[in-house]
Image (spheres, grey):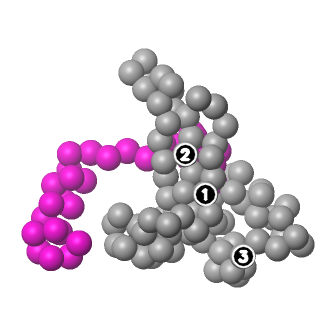
Amino acid sequence: MTNEPDVELAPRHPCVRCGTPILAAVTVPISDTEHSAGRRITATVCPTCDRHHPAPEVQGVIAYFTLNERITGDEIEGAGQVLSDWAQYVTTHPPTYTSTDLDDEIEAWERGEM
């Protein structure tokens, strides 16, 4: 198992929150507790659900792919920096999922919103 982030651009799976195609996914190692040592967690950027995310690293990914449909040779350094910044952000701020989040999703599913 590697300690390096694994970035996937234009993953095949849609956003689990809204079904929109996601821009990118990153899988990073987490070790914030003794129980999570060696685990990896995946975070995604959805242009719909994350458009108001407060982290500039998330906004950087959205902005980059809003302006650039794909990464060209001329843009490789800029894209690399944006994705690296985001991967580092996810490493230090791994996503959490609470029982309240689960309850909210169950209620949304029961209303036919998912």
Please tell me whether residue 92 is drawn above or below residue 89 in the rendered image. above
Q: Is residue 111 magenta?
A: yes
Boundaries of the magenta span: 86-114
Res. 32 in view: no
Amino acid bearing label 3: Arg
Q: Which residue is more in the foreground, 73 or 65?
A: 73
Q: Residue furthest front?
A: 12
- For label 3, the crowd category at 10 Å Cα-Cα, with few meaning under 14, some 14 to 19 and many 20 or more, is some
Q: Split into 4 quadrants, where in the image is the C terminus?
A: bottom left
Label 2 sits on a secondary structure element that is: strand
Which residue has dot 2 on it?
A: 27
The residue carrying mark 3 is: 70
21 and 86: which is toward the camera = 21
**Marks 2,1: beta carbons within 8 A:** yes
**Location of mark 1 (residue):** 8
Is 13 a magenta residue? no
Which residue is pictured at 20% across the width and 45% down the height?
Answer: 99
